[in-house]
Image: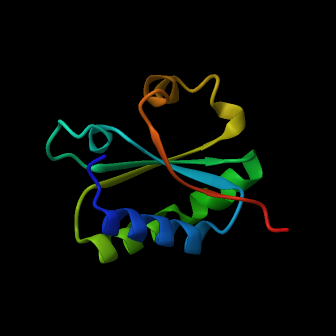
Amino acid sequence: MRLTLEQQQIIIKTFSSIFKKNSALFLYGSRVDDKKKGGDIDLLIITDDEEEKKIAMGKKLDFIVTLKLELGDQKIDCLILSKSELNTHLFYQTIKDEMVMLHRLLPNP
């Protein structure tokens, strides 16, 4: 994975502070492959259900802006899907075998 430990920590901390619960964060794309160079940071957030997805979509811009402030101005892509979409979402089907989980937020007790 071509993210430094510091970059990983910043991404996880930002994700945790903005999204709070019921979602998982994955890295996919060229940053997963140690042999590739350059590339943007491709992130996928999977929510437990459609309602959580709607909430997450409302927070997406805040997430990306905060990451850019913390990591520096670089290209960051963020896709948000609910679990119910995974079997039919064609792009997800192309990335699912390469993606790496960065963090999982559980429901509040």
Given the current orientation, which residue lies at the most extreme left position? 37
Which residue is drawn at the image coordinates 17% and 37% (left, top)? Answer: 36
Q: Is residue 36 left or right of residue 87?
A: left
Q: Quadrant of residue 70?
A: bottom left
Residue situated in front as seen by the camera: 76 or 26: 26
Task: Give percent across and percent down for residue 14.
Answer: 48, 71
Q: How is the image coloured?
A: rainbow
Task: Give percent across and percent down for residue 57.
Answer: 58, 57
Task: Give percent across and percent down for residue 68.
Answer: 31, 70
Task: Decide: is 70 above or below 54.
Answer: below
Which residue is drawn at the image coordinates 61% and 66% (left, top)? Answer: 19
Residue situated in front as seen by the camera: 64 or 23: 23
Task: Give percent across and percent down for residue 85.
Answer: 66, 32
Which residue is drawn at the image coordinates 69% and 38% (left, top)? Answer: 83
Task: Decide: is 98 above or below 54.
Answer: above
Which residue is drawn at the image coordinates 33% and 64% (left, top)? Answer: 5
Task: Decide: is 44 above or below 59.
Answer: above
Q: Is residue 61 left or right of residue 5?
A: right
Q: Quadrant of residue 103?
A: bottom right
Of the 4 image quadrants, the one containing the C terminus is bottom right
